Image (tube, rainbow, N blue to C red):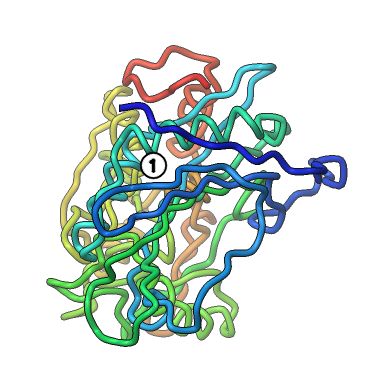
């Protein structure tokens, strides 16, 4: 069913104020945003308005009880053409998070119509410089004006966008985390809920104070199994192929991770999704069989890991390894996302 989306245009675009050669990440926002409200029975008030502050009660339920979820996705420009990369997977994952957090489902038509209407209005904000994209942030949060621990009756769904450059500028130094945990079995680690990221900030800051860029999360029981890094999934390349930790309920099913696995298999590169221990990583490194480490995520895309620290020792992977596999993946995925090569997976949707 088509959604009647009202549009309020901004009185003055801010695009002329933006240096698209120096945009950084997550600090510059496009002119408009999409909003819709759940009134307890249905989604209403689909609208596009100028990007700006939201007016909220101090008693807004999401602030106190954490019913807030989000997605991250990107649009890419090649000449006058704009491409979305796997937007329906983001819609599906948003609703997986919504179910676990007792929030209403966002219909596919509402998600895609709101997204496309917003992007058509702000298409000039999609940058075309190397490594850049339009980052898209769909999110939903509880809006009940009520202090009491229960699922909210009302919610707001919003999409805003921002032009971005690379998330990381260089390969990362990471520290294996052995005290703190990102998520627990039976919890919400597989969702993109706000609390997962808030809880990760303190151990990440501790690692950064020691000169590292990120933490490498391990399983919450034994702290011996690799899970993921701060906002990304983890891959190890050996002479035999590629290993990535198998998914379970303490890990996020990354859309970029899934894309990487598909492209690896399409290149006939042996790929294993299985448990991977820190001990095995160290053994592979000692044997000279750890060719490279890299991470994947929407914001980061593919970033190499320089090395990892564990129990006071630093294992420099790039010193003896290479970036052959990650370079191949980065090149092929980027070419598909920009509509420059064949898309054998049906991932790209042209605006």
The vertical placement of 279 against 128, above or below, is below
Q: Residue at x 35, y 46 (%)?
A: 237
Quarter placement of the N terminus: top left
Up-down: is 71 above or below 155? above
Residue 120 lies left or right of residue 142; in this view the side is right
The reply, left or right, for residue 141 in relation to residue 323 is left
Question: In the picture, residue 312 is in which quadrant?
Answer: bottom left
In the rendered image, which residue does mark 1 sit on? 256
Relative to 283, 339 lies left or right: right
**Judging from the image, what secondary structure is the residue with disc 1 in?**
helix
Residue 204: x and y, percent? 48, 78
Q: How many marks?
A: 1
Assess disc 1: are there few (<14), some (14-19) or many (≥20) residues with their C-alpha within 10 Å of its C-alpha.
many
Q: Nearer the viewer, residue 272 or 143?
A: 143
**Residue found at x 22% / y 66%:** 250
Residue shown at 43% from the left, 77% from the top: 60
Answer yes or no: is residue 168 visible.
yes
Residue at horizontal 39 percent and vertical 74 percent from the top: 62
**Residue 336 at what x, y percent from top left?**
47, 22
Q: Nearer the viewer, residue 45 or 328?
A: 45
């Amino acid at each position: 069913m088509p959604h009647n989306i009202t549009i309020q245009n901004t009185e003055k675009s801010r695009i002329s104020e933006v240096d698209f050669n120096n945009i950084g990440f997550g600090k510059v926002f496009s002119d408009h945003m999409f909003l819709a409200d759940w009134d307890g029975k249905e989604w209403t008030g689909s609208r596009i308005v100028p990007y700006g502050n939201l007016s909220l009660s101090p008693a807004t339920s999401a602030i106190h009880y954490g019913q807030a979820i989000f997605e991250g996705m990107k649009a890419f420009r090649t000449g006058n053409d704009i491409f979305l990369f796997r937007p329906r997977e983001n819609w599906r994952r948003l609703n997986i998070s919504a179910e676990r957090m007792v929030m209403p489902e966002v219909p596919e038509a509402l998600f895609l119509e709101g997204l496309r209407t917003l992007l058509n209005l702000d298409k000039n904000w999609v940058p075309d410089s190397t490594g850049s994209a339009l980052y898209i942030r769909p999110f939903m949060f509880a809006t009940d004006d009520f202090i009491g621990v229960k699922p909210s009756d009302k919610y707001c769904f919003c999409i805003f966008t921002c032009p971005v450059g690379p998330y990381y500028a260089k390969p990362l130094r990471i520290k294996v985390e052995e005290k703190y945990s990102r998520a627990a079995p039976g919890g919400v680690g597989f969702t993109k809920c706000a609390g997962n990221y808030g809880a990760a900030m303190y151990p990440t800051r501790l690692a950064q104070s020691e000169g590292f860029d990120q933490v490498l999360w391990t399983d919450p029981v034994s702290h011996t199994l690799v899970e993921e890094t701060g906002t990304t999934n983890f891959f190890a390349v050996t002479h035999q192929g590629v290993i990535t930790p198998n998914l379970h309920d303490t890990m996020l099913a990354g859309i970029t991770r899934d894309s990487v696995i598909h492209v690896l298999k399409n290149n006939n590169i042996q790929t294993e999704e299985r448990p991977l221990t820190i001990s095995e990583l160290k053994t592979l490194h000692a044997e000279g069989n750890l060719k490279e480490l890299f991470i994947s995520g929407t914001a980061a895309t593919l970033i190499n890991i320089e090395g990892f620290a564990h129990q006071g020792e630093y294992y420099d992977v790039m010193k003896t390894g290479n970036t052959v596999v990650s370079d191949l993946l980065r090149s092929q995925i980027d070419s598909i996302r920009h509509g420059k090569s064949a898309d054998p997976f049906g991932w790209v949707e042209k605006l």
